[in-house]
Image (tube, grey):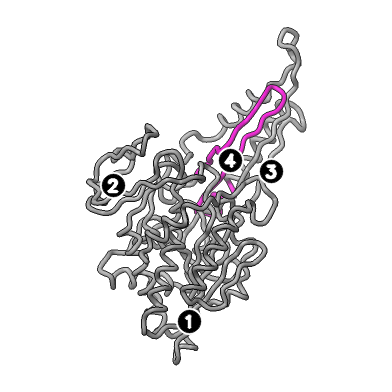
Amino acid sequence: MKAYERFLNYVKVHTTSDDYSDTAPTTSCQFDLAKMLVKEMQNLGLHNVRLDEKCYVYGEIPATAGCEDKVSLGFIAHMDTTPDFCGKNIKPQIIDNYNGKDLPLGNSGRMLSTKYFPHLSDLKGRTLITTDGTTLLGADNKAGIAEILTACEHILNGNKPHGRIAVAFTPDEEVGKGADGFDVKDFGCDFAYTVDGGYECEIEYENFNGCDAKFEIQGINVHPGTAKNVMINASLLAMEINSLLPGVEIPGYTEEYEGFYHLTRMEGTVEKAKLEYIVRDHSKELYEIRKNTLKHIAKIMNEKYGEETVNITITDRYANMAELIKPHFHLIENAESAIRKIGLKPIVKPIRGGTDGARLSYMGLPCPNLGTGGYGFHGPYEHITAEGMEVCVSIIQELIKIYSEYEH
């Protein structure tokens, strides 16, 4: 089966995670895809296939004779889709021999435009898969699952030597909990790769340090006719708080290693208001400065409007994995070699986000990130090509071959 065919099966399954849930997984619907994957992996012939109570799927391909002492290599992807946009009732558009031009997304009124996605011209002639404009697509990260299992199918049907290969599919990556219940010891790998990036030739090992920040604002609501020197409008304070942040340090104005403050949610009345941000920076020092800036704003607001007017909660999500990957830089060099072996040029770049691999690296499993061939994640403009997915399958296969000969 082709990777894109698997992918189209997976996106039919609703797996949106939930930022505000305390359960594990955060949504029970993720079990629907997990159970589907377990059956597929068993049918493919993977060994020790299992699904645990927290919705983690594991399986492995034992080493071939004579390769038992080679590197045990893992490949990981996540099953959930982001709660940022609708992930239910996905209806993909499949465009054969795409012309590289602007493309209407169903009858939604939305347009996949070369103005905002200039790489579209490079996809001319490919089989393009898009949304119908009413949902996201789910390439983040069901494309990674499809590519990993397609590579496994080739390995199982082939007759080439390889070390032990393990795969895992996780829940709740999109809400920062993807590694919470991951059993690194039982996974049993020396190294791993998440297959959770963008362009098909991307390799990423530098990610953001990231946290969530929430301001909760308590106002004083009285009749506006008698409000002088009494009323404190919580919604206006929320606007003031946001105005104290640097307006150019937001996602729409930053790139590469530049960090940002990203307002993701706001709600408010005169009585109460909330602001929710994600905060990101590749530099650990600048990341700490950003968090201190938020705390300082809360302090200033309380000095101005009274103690307990503003409360801030900051929750760290992940840290930059670079310092843990550099001692095992063969992971990057071998990924580059795998891409060159299939005749393409590797793209090594920082992740403007985070992955399960960042947290797993800090849990003792060095785990950089590979591309999936997808673009425009987390919204209705998400798209991918069948050909790009096959490139990713080939890269995984080449990596397995390289590590079947690698001495460590």
| Disc 1, SS | loop
Q: Seen from this angle, which residue lies furthest top?
A: 225
Spatial CA span between label 3 and label 4: 10 Å
| Disc 4, SS | strand
Spatial CA span between label 3 and label 2: 40 Å
Where is residue 347? Give x, y as percent.
34, 60
* Residue that appears at 29% across and 53% down: 127
Mark earlier in primary sequence (3, 2): 2
Dividing the picture into quadrants, the one containing residue 319 is bottom right
| Disc 2, SS | helix
| Of marks 2 and 1, the one in the foreground | 2
Q: Which mark is residue 313?
A: 3
Residue linked to disc 1? 71
Mark 4 touches mark 2? (CB < 8 Å): no
Residue linked to disc 4? 277
Q: Which of 164 and 290 is in front in this view?
A: 164
